[in-house]
Image (cartoon, helix red, strand yellow):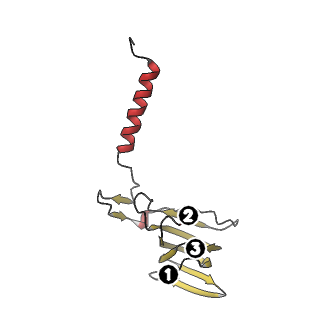
Amino acid sequence: MGDIDKKALEAMVRKVLAELLAEAPKATPGWKTVDPSGIMSVRTAQVRPEPFDTGKAGDRVFLKDISELSESPRLGFGVMEMDRSVFKWTLNYDEVDYVIEGTLEILIDGRKVVGQAGDVIFIPAHSTIEFSAPGLTRFFYVVYPANWYEQ
């Protein structure tokens, strides 16, 4: 290779590739379209939530965050599915849940707030609740602030 050191050339190529990859637009899943302006369109029916660990064996709870902090630094949102499960949770953020299908029950202080398909439930920050689904339930959630876990 003449005067060029192979290791130096490899380091240079790796650096250029890393810079190009950092500048390349991020690939998004087929259910999500992000315009260069930041406007996002999501086909929630195509979002497939992944298993979510509630800390309790046997819970059938699935979650998929749709937004990333780089896309939406103030609001977080995603889709959750539950099937005949109940789990305790303390919210460090305000949350709005839109029930897409099924029944979502929020248990607090011995009371039950019930949302059916098409209903919206608001849960204020610092609430200790139980999320409950007597059957298959799917809902869209919005949390504020999005970086609640960094606080």
Query: Which label sits on residue 91?
Result: 3
- The amino acid at mark 1 is Phe
Q: CA distance from mark 3 to mark 1?
A: 12 Å
For disc 2, the marked residue is 149
Residue displayed at 54% across by 74% down: 137
* Residue at 33%, 61% in the rendered image: 38
Residue 85 makes an appearance in the image: no
Q: Amino acid at mark 2?
A: Tyr
Instruction: Check disc 2 and report its element: helix, strand or loop.
Output: helix
Residue 55, percent across and down?
Answer: 68, 65
**Badge 2: few (under 14), some or many (20 or more) residues near its Cα, within 10 Å?**
few
In the image shown, does 68 or 64 lie closer to the viewer? Answer: 68
Q: Which residue is mark 1?
A: 122
Q: Callout 3: helix, strand or loop?
A: loop
The single residue placed furthest to the front in the displayed view is 151
User: Of tags 3 and 1, which is closer to the observer?
Assistant: 3
Quarter occupied by residue 23: top left
Whether residue 95 is visible here, answered yes or no, is yes
- Vertically, is 25 above or below 63? above
Q: Residues within 10 Å of mark 1 (few under 14, many from 20)?
A: some
Query: Closest to the observer: 79 or 74?
Result: 74
Residue 82: percent from the left, percent from the top? 58, 71
* Number of marks drawn: 3
Q: Quadrant of residue 19?
A: top left
Name the residue type under label 3.
Answer: Leu
Location of residue 108 in the rendering, given as x and y in whole percent from the top left corner: 63, 84
Furthest-top residue in this view: 2
